[in-house]
Amino acid sequence: MVDSCFVSQGLTALAAFLLFPFDSLAASQIEDQAEQFFRSGHTNNWAVLVCTSRFWFNYRHVANTLSVYRSVKRLGIPDSHIVLMLADDMACNPRNPKPATVFSHKNMELNVYGDDVEVDYRSYEVTVENFLRLLTGRIPSSTPRSKRLLSDDRSNILIYMTGHGGNGFLKFQDSEEITNIELADAFEQMWQKRRYNELLFIIDTCQGASMYERFYSPNIMALASSQVGEDSLSHQPDPAIGVHLMDRYTFYVLEFLEEINPASQMNMNDLFQVCPKSLCVSTPGHRTDLFQRDPKNVLITDFFGSVRKVEITTETISLQPDSRIMESSYKEDQMDEELMEPLKYAEQLPVAQIIHQKPKLKDWHPPGGFILGLWALIIMVFFKTYGIKHMKFIF
């Protein structure tokens, strides 16, 4: 009897000894996974959207930037985390037939200027110096918060740029230019100063791929509308406005983004395929060798969306619905619907629904020479009827 007790105790001790390493190993693996999750995750999103072109014939570059602005706001990035730089104010341009509007689609269906656009840098504030100071944080202490990029090492940053460029440079307002070396060095300063976790760079310009060739900092993914030696082409001419409304690459990127919602599982590989050469005419490019994660594991909302705040609590919360509470909340919802204001800027219809609607009838305007021809006809009839001797009664 005593021997059997000793044998059973020995077997129990042996089993505990054998299981102990496996339990500790499993616990350590779980701890490592949790620690890696919190190390690699980001806690906030920022967007820097830059239009570098002036003058009315560059209307499409302003529309490009405002369209991206509309998309990131719709997906949840607030204005406090968006830095918008517009080199010209097309909405207030004297040539604009529809003041206070900027359209990105034919028939003037979608106004991307909206009613609550917050432009942080405008007109001659959009310079190479101000842009580089914004990225690197080397700005005067008197600079207001809206003109600062207050990111940190847990920030995912989207940088979108559009304008006229060439092999290794992008022009700012036809008066200066930023080179790919200056841009690469600015990103390296951002990395050294722990100003980003991951960075997505998108550029829509001629020979756009040349702008990311010199990048050397980690955790940067880059996309461009065209390869070296190629032009980035415009899209959707509008006779009523007299200019092209958007560039091809940005147009198809935004069509793709309109299908995205904050809970979407679409990844960056899907974004790479949105504008093949058959649509863009140019050859879009991308660079991922500096990026640590596989693009197929990077959600679109990691850059274009907003990280949701989560509060952890130890309190017990009852999930059983209370009929009285449900009834009161239903009444409140009904009252809110009755008092609801018109749709705000970020809640407008998606582009996909707008561009397939039946176009509105355009306002009729007489041709350019119609009025002049009418006056010429009146004068001819007058001369033929009364002759030149009656001119003294008119003047």
Image (cartoon, helix red, strand yellow):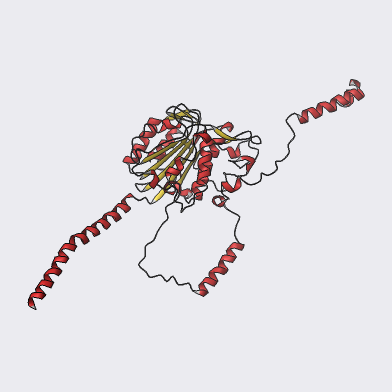
Left or right placement of residue 63 versus residue 177 in this view: right
Q: Residue at x 13, y 69 (%)?
A: 11
Question: Residue furthest toward the top?
Answer: 388
Residue 289 position within the rendered picture, expressed as x and y whole percent measured from the top left:
35, 37
Residue 117 place in picture, x, y as percent: 54, 46
x, y percent for residue 345: 56, 50
Task: Say whether residue 138 is visible.
Answer: no
How many marks are shown on the rendered structure? 0
Q: Quadrant of residue 245?
A: top right
Q: Nearer the viewer, residue 316 or 24?
A: 24
Q: Residue at x 81, y 26 (%)?
A: 376
Residue 206 lies left or right of residue 199; in this view the side is: right
Quadrant of the frame with the N terminus = bottom left
Is residue 234 visible to the viewer in this orientation of the structure?
yes
* Front one among 57 and 87: 57
Residue 346 position, x and y percent, is: 54, 50
Question: Is 296 positioned to the left or the right of 241 in the image?
Answer: left
Judged from this view, the residue extending furthest toward the left is 3
- Give me the residue at 9% from left, 73% from top: 6
User: Which quadrant would the C terminus be assigned to in this image?
Assistant: top right
Q: Is residue 342 above or below residue 120?
A: below
